[in-house]
Amino acid sequence: MQPQEIPANTAKRSRIEFIDCLRGFALASICIVHFMEQYLGAGAPAGMENYGQHGPADPILEAIAFILIRGKGFALFSFMFGLSFALQLIRREEGVGKGRFVWRMVILLMIGLGHSFLYRGDILSIYALLAVPLLWFERLRDKTLIIIALVLMLGAPRVVLTAVQPKATPEATEAAKKRDEASALAHFKTSKEGPFIKAMHQNITIGVMDRLAFQFGEFSRGYQTFAYFLLGLIAGRNRWFEDLAGNTGLFRRLFRWAGGLSIAIPVVAITLFFALKAVAGKSETESSPWMALVGLSAYDAWNFANTLFYIAGFALLFQRPKWNHILSKLAPFGRMGLTNYVTQSVLGGLVFFSIGLGKLGEIGNLVTLSIALGVICLQMVISRIWLAKFRFGPMEWFWRCLTKLRLEPLRRA
């Protein structure tokens, strides 16, 4: 399919600003979630599930974060990655062809693995692994990509995994549970108390394997990520964000439908759960792997609807002058997305881990949310100052130089 032509200069400026702002919004959401999770990047030890709740406001903030941003920030960030893929490969911007794109992802994988030494929940390495298969989907029609994305989003890989995996014996299940609990406790204690060299070793070994299991096992986060890549690819090659005013009708319909589904999905899921529990009995319902599967898929579908709701709402607000003035402040922050993402992990490590204050589990959501908002504001200011003098963020420049295998000019002329 051939995207329609648009006025180059005005559209490109509008596209760059809007995409950077939306990326900044996604990055801010990720920052809040990660700080409220205290950069643990794994399951909490048994009996310490509420390690971030120390005061009366903390459980309320946890519930608000669950409803508004948990699971949505990564989705928006993944969508933006697919959109960037479209801009680089479909339009061949800046001479980045397929071979160069693969090399670019190899470098991102190395950056992500380096980041994994500090933060067990790194997403950059997963993005790098999932990005290369996008090349096989580039030429497919939009309808085909939408079907594939929905199949992945609604849990088809999870269904297959549940169906083919052999049923574990009670003894094996109990043994696996004990191993997981011991691993979670070791990660928590070593991250908090040190030695940090041991924590780094755990992160890059056990942590990487656990992350792959989380991404491509029962939780299937990686398949969802790839689905958002595909949706971003569709949006990018159709240039939906290059002419916001011309696509207002599309965004309004998406806003209404996604908003309605955001309400309907949890209502239907809760009603179905209680109906099945009444028929099958509480113990059988709660122990069934298929009920867990349905619950996870319903949660993913709800996050999916919320994410589309945010994208459409952001596009509509961005066209209003007063909101445009506010949201545009996110643009420098989003342009330096890689730098700010990694820097957030460094700051989180200094607050929560043994290399810094070691406050993991000692402070609550109210404090960690305040820290996250402070980090976001600080990074917004620094990003604006930096980009006034330099063309790229430090990590973006490093990535660009390695991609092109030459030293790129950094300072603005």
Image (cartoon, grey):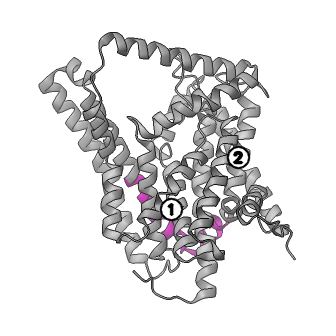
Q: Mark 1, residues whose alpha carbon is within 10 Å: few (<14), some, or many (≥20)?
A: many
Q: Residue at x 72, y 27 (%)?
A: 353
Q: Magenta stretch: residue 322 in it?
A: yes
Which structural element holds mark 1? Answer: helix
Q: Residue at x 57, y 34 (%)?
A: 208
Image quarter of residue 327? bottom right
Query: Could you tell whether 51 is left or right of 234 in the image?
Result: right
Image quarter of residue 358? top right
Q: Compared to 379, does 96 lie above or below?
A: below
Foreground residue among 296 and 147? 147
Query: Could you tell whether 234 is left or right of 202 in the image?
Result: left
Q: Is residue 311 visible?
A: no
On the image, the x and y values in percent for residue 271 come to 21, 37
| First in sequence: mark 2 vs mark 1 | 1
Bounds of the magenta segment: 305-328
Residue under label 1, please give it: 82
Q: Is residue 250 visible?
A: yes
Q: Amino acid at mark 2?
A: Val
Foreground residue among 156 and 369? 156
On the image, the x and y values in percent for residue 167 come to 27, 22
Q: Main secondary structure of the magenta part?
A: helix
